[in-house]
Amino acid sequence: MDRDQVAAVLDEAEKALEKGETKLGPSGFWKAVGAAKRDPALVEEFGGRFATIDRTAFEKWAFFSVPSGIGTLLAVVWTIVGFGLILWAYSLDQPANGLVLLVGTAITLVTTHGLAHMVVGRLFGMRFTSWFVGSLRRPQPGVKVDYATYLRTPAKQRAWMHASGAVLTKLIPFFALGPALVMEAPWWTTALLVLLGV
C-alpha cells in the first residue's frame, strides 16, 4: 500500500466515523496500519491521523473509560488491596486463609495486567490515553495506547508491550503458590491456583 492509498483509506475511515461507524476494518484502516508498521515514512506523515481515527473509534466503542492518570491510580490502589488481602490471609485459619488468598490473587491478577502493559510500553516510549472496560461481557479493565507513539515504536518492542500483560497474568497464580504452601491453605486453594496458571 503506497502513500496515496493510505491517505485514501484514512479519508474513508474518517468519513465512516462521522457517519457513526465504530468498526474500522471495512475502510481498510487496519491494512493501512500494517503498511505503516513496515514503512516509517508513512508513520511520520500519517501517525497523528492514525492516532486520531483510532482514538475516535475507541471512544465510540468502549463501554466505560477514564483518563490514564486516574485509571493508573485506581489500578495501583487495587493492586495494593490485593497484596493486602494476601498478607492478611497469613493471619487466618483454614478455610478462610485460602479464600482470602484466592480473592487477593484474583484482584492482583486483574489489575497488574494493564499495569504491565503500561510499564513496558512507557519504557519503550509509548504513551497511554486511558483505562477502559470494553463491554459488560468482558469487564476486565484494559489500557489504551496512543497509536501515534505505538506506531513509532519498533516491532519487537511493540511485541514485548503486548506480551507483558499476558506473561505477568500467567505468572501471578504460580507466585501465589508460595504463600499458599507457607500459610497451609486448603488443598483446593493450591489446586485452583495451579489450574488458573495453567
Image (cartoon, rainbow, N blue to C red):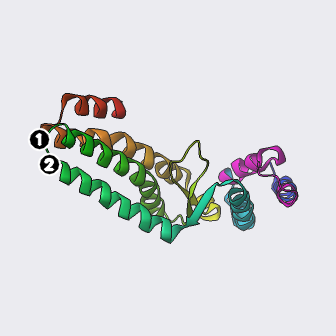
| Crowd class of label 2 (few under 14; some 14 to 19; many from 20; radius 10 Å) | some
On the image, the x and y values in percent for residue 22 come to 77, 52
**Element marked by disc 2:** loop
- Which range is magenta? 13-37
The answer to whether 155 appears left or right of 28 in the picture is left
On the image, the x and y values in percent for residue 114 come to 46, 54
- Residue depicted at 71% across the width and 51% down the height: 33
Q: Nearer the viewer, residue 111 or 161?
A: 111
The answer to whether 17 appears left or right of 82 in the picture is right
Q: Which residue is mark 1?
A: 182
For badge 2, the amino acid type reads: Tyr
Q: Nearer the viewer, residue 122 or 89?
A: 89
**Element marked by disc 1:** helix
On the image, the x and y values in percent for residue 170 come to 37, 39
Q: CA distance from mark 1 to mark 2?
A: 8 Å
Q: Which one is in front in this view, the residue at disc 1 or the one at disc 2?
A: 2
Query: What secondary structure characterizes most of the magenta part?
Result: helix
For badge 1, the amino acid type reads: Val
Quadrant hosting residue 93? top left
- Residue depicted at 48% across the width and 59% down the height: 121
Q: Nearer the viewer, residue 67 or 44?
A: 67
Q: Which badge, 1 or 2, is on the more N-terminal residue?
A: 2
- Residue depicted at 72% across the width and 65% down the height: 52
Q: Which residue is mark 2?
A: 90
Residue 57 visible in the current orientation = yes
Location of the C terminus by quadrant is: top left
CB atoms of marks 1 and 2 within 8 Å: yes
> Does residue 16 belong to the magenta stretch?
yes
